[in-house]
Image (tube, coloured by chain):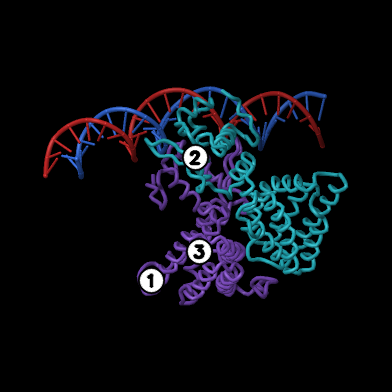
Chain colours: A purple, B cyan, C red, D blue
Amino acid sequence: MSSLRLPGDRNLTYGLVESLGRSIVAGKFDAKPFPTEGELATQHGTSRSVTREAVKMLTAKGLLRARPRQGTSVTSESHWNLLDPDVLRWLLERKFSLPLLKEFTQMRLAIEPAAVALAAAHADAAALTRIEACLERMRAADRGEGDAVEADIAFHTSLLGASGNRFFANLDQLVNTALRISIRFTNSVKGRAASIPQHEEVLNAVRAHEAERAATAMRVLILDVLELVSAAEPRSARASPRAGRRRA
Amino acid sequence: MSSLRLPGDRNLTYGLVESLGRSIVAGKFDAKPFPTEGELATQHGTSRSVTREAVKMLTAKGLLRARPRQGTSVTSESHWNLLDPDVLRWLLERKFSLPLLKEFTQMRLAIEPAAVALAAAHADAAALTRIEACLERMRAADRGEGDAVEADIAFHTSLLGASGNRFFANLDQLVNTALRISIRFTNSVKGRAASIPQHEEVLNAVRAHEAERAATAMRVLILDVLELVSAAEPRSARASPRAGRRRA
DNA sequence: CCCGCTGAATTATCATATAATTCAGTCATA
DNA sequence: TATGACTGAATTATATGATAATTCAGCGGG
């Protein structure tokens, strides 16, 4: 019935994945059971081929589980693949989960300083140029030219790529997705946009091949975010924003 | 034609995914173009439904790209999703990639110390019991009772789970997959199995809620692995095993 | 109380047909 | 010659209908 015109619908299958993914994360099937293949097809006006492919993709993302006779069902939330950008986006967009954002920032605090340390050690000329371009975009955005959020994101992902570590580089899409929401949040709390000087310090350290200094600069930057996110939480079990770390 | 009896074949589709995934990673389609849907179906004796679902899953893993008229093609390696346990396993098993193992260990060095620090801060009683059980399994394996590799893996993944951070916890499958190969490698280089005292130190620190001490202990443990892996590399661009870090 | 059988519901697989997309070539035109 | 619209063919995308395999729930016998 519905035309299924959702963002990222290269075709019917992806549109259905998007639609179902949102519904699942929103908890629409917490009470009533998940429809069978046939029901899904008729409800959405898609063929069984499309329906099956969508279910298979959501299964790959850990949201669904299909077995003969038993039918298809939503898995417990702990099985959901948070490292999948789609899943994370659905979770962060729908019921805006502050705890999840905090946990994401904790992961960034582990990953990004290590990545910039590697970037400082490798110091590819072309990569450096790319990072500088991102910083320039941030400066331009600060003057009102261009999108500050996109520039900020590009800065961080370009550093992940410059690390020369394929695992860090592979996190770019995830960071891209979540950072977009994270920045929107931090900007809403404090009026201030991203701090240019802090980002400059990271770049300078990388350019100077000073790994430890670069890592520290990045750590400071992300700790700021983590404190903003933690402060927004209701008072409960957040004695230390990032336990057991001092002297970066 | 072939019966497609490969590990992890809950059904024909997963079997085909496994088979094609290995072939792609092995570079079987670097010269010749990737077959069309129809060709794949006839070659493997599967219906087009199964073939399409397999192709779709491999597309989700970033290995393939399908467009009408143009056909299906293998993407460049930089698009492959290393965070997918299947993809990583195919890469590590097939052409045993030492650089990739090194990069994976670098990521562990970023993740696991942060995770144990959080685990030490949270200190859930039930989680502690689980970790202790894993250590006991390691001790038992040291006496010849049980599998040492599995116990070692369980120790590390249980700590990821105890971190209380869902992103760290979600890395368990990835660590489970790659650690299995990593341990096999380190054990082959040096005869020694995993160091029990080092693991005990981690657990003790977590039990005592000493986050920084726990992180340090884990860092030491993984640095040992990283040095083993780095030492096995041919002499080239590895001036410092983990640049800009000293005094763990 | 337990074990095996049976039936039914649902996914898994197969087979075939039609639509949509897009690349490569053709041809008219400036 | 260069350029742009048109055309045809190849391939995926979607639809539809049928059969097989799996497994749960319930029944019946021991």
- Quarter that holds the N terminus of chain B: top right
| Chain of residue at mark 3 | A
Q: Is residue B108 left or right of residue C29?
A: right
The answer to whether the residue labelled 1 contacts the one labelled 3, judged by CB atoms less than 8 Å apart, is no
The answer to whether the residue labelled 2 contacts the one labelled 3, judged by CB atoms less than 8 Å apart, is no
Which x, y percent locates residue B194? 79, 52
- Give the residue furthest to the right: B143
- Quarter that holds the C terminus of chain B: bottom right
- What amino acid is labelled 1 in the image? Ala
Q: Is residue A90 left or right of residue B158?
A: left
In this rendering, does residue A100 appear at all? no
| Residue wearing tag 3 | A156
| Residue wearing tag 2 | B56
Element under disc 3: helix
- Give the residue furthest to the front: B235
Disc 2 and disc 3 on one polypeptide chain: no
Give me the C-alpha separation between circle 2 and circle 3.
30 Å
Residue at the (48%, 30%) spot, across then down: B48
Camera-side residue of A158 and B200: A158
- What amino acid is labelled 3 in the image? His
Which x, y percent locates residue C30? 11, 44
| Chain of residue at mark 2 | B
| Residue wearing tag 1 | A140
- What amino acid is labelled 2 in the image? Lys
Which numbered disc, 1 or 2, marks the residue closer to the eye?
1
